[in-house]
Amino acid sequence: MTEQTQNTDGQSTRPMFFNKLMTFDREIHANLKLDTNSGFEFAARAHLVPITISEFRYVARQYPIIFSSGAIPMPFAVLGLREGTNLMVGADNQWRNRTYIPGAIHTYPFILLPISKDSDEISLVVDPGAKCLGDTGEALFADGKPTPVLNRIIELTQTFRAGMIRTIAFGKMLAEHKMVEARGVELTLQDGSKFRVDNFLTLSPGKIDEAANNIFLRWRKEGWILPMFQYLQSMDSWSMLGDLESERRAAEAAAKA
């Protein structure tokens, strides 16, 4: 499977979904509004989305998790079985009911980024061309001060950035101990046909079992044990995607009939 906007070092050249990056400015964006009902058209073709290990507990219940093939293995939620198809976004551009929306999608079109390549200082960045931004929706400033909506956005982006920092450390550990391996999965769709997904990287259960006691204790201290087992739980979620792919195919066949 192909990771989108992903470098070999495990970090994006540009955050997924962002066409442009612009520092969010109190004066420039004083009258900007956010349409929270604009839907998820921007994510409709994202079959893979980067996630943090803090999200594993939610993702694992519904989506398989795989890892990128770069020098730092980074986790992705699998949202579709075919490149360019997100099975969670319907024809109405709404997210499927009662399913988790990954943080990278939930926070768009905002993200926290360093102000320069080697800086520790960060700033809120926006994609100025996002369809959800404009003259309609919730105000982001009132009398020059952030509204509760903007404060919530800032809180969400801070949480996502903190989670990504932890995830990069987790990925470095996986690389250090050679914890990921290539595999594939074969699904039986509802019409009896077979669908195979190959060439993705998974966390090896055997490598967890083989870890020396001192390594295992370090993983526990860093808070990495639970995400490992939450990841393994996610492997049971391939069947749900198979059912959704079956529904998609049936709907397409009915439309052509």
Image: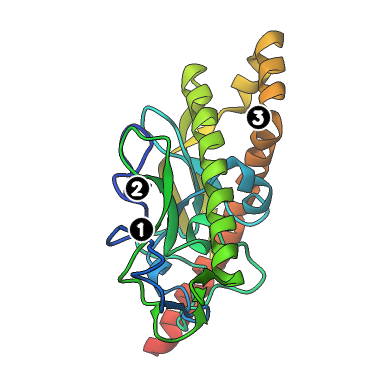
Q: In which image quadrant can residue 100 be found? A: bottom right
Disc 1 vs disc 2: Cβ atoms closer than 8 Å?
yes
Few, some or many residues within 10 Å of mark 1 (<14, 14–19, 20+):
some
Few, some or many residues within 10 Å of mark 3 (<14, 14–19, 20+):
some
Residue 160: give x, y in percent of width and height.
54, 49
Residue 181: give x, y in percent of width and height.
47, 28
Residue drawn at the location 38% of the way across and 61% of the way down: 24
Which of disc 2 and disc 1 is earlier in sequence?
2
Disc 3 marks which amino acid?
Answer: Trp
The foreground one among 2 and 43 is 43
Taking 26 as reference, is 223 left or right?
right
Residue lying furthest front: 143
The circle on residue 224 is 3
Disc 2 marks which amino acid?
Answer: Thr
Residue on which disc 2 sits: 2
Q: If the image is split into quadrants, where does the C terminus sit?
A: bottom left
Residue 38: give x, y in percent of width and height.
46, 80
Disc 1 vs disc 3: which is toward the camera? 3
Residue drawn at the location 56% of the way across and 35% of the way down: 166
Q: Is residue 115 above or below residue 145?
A: above
Residue on which disc 1 sits: 83
Q: CA distance from mark 1 to mark 3?
A: 30 Å
Disc 1 marks which amino acid?
Answer: Glu
The foreground one among 183 and 134 is 134
Which of disc 2 and disc 3 is earlier in sequence?
2
Q: CA distance from mark 3 to mark 2?
A: 26 Å
Q: Is residue 179 visible?
A: no
Q: Is residue 219 above or below residue 136?
A: above
Q: Secondary structure at mark 1?
A: loop
Q: In which image quadrant can residue 170 be found? A: top right
The foreground one among 8 and 67 is 8
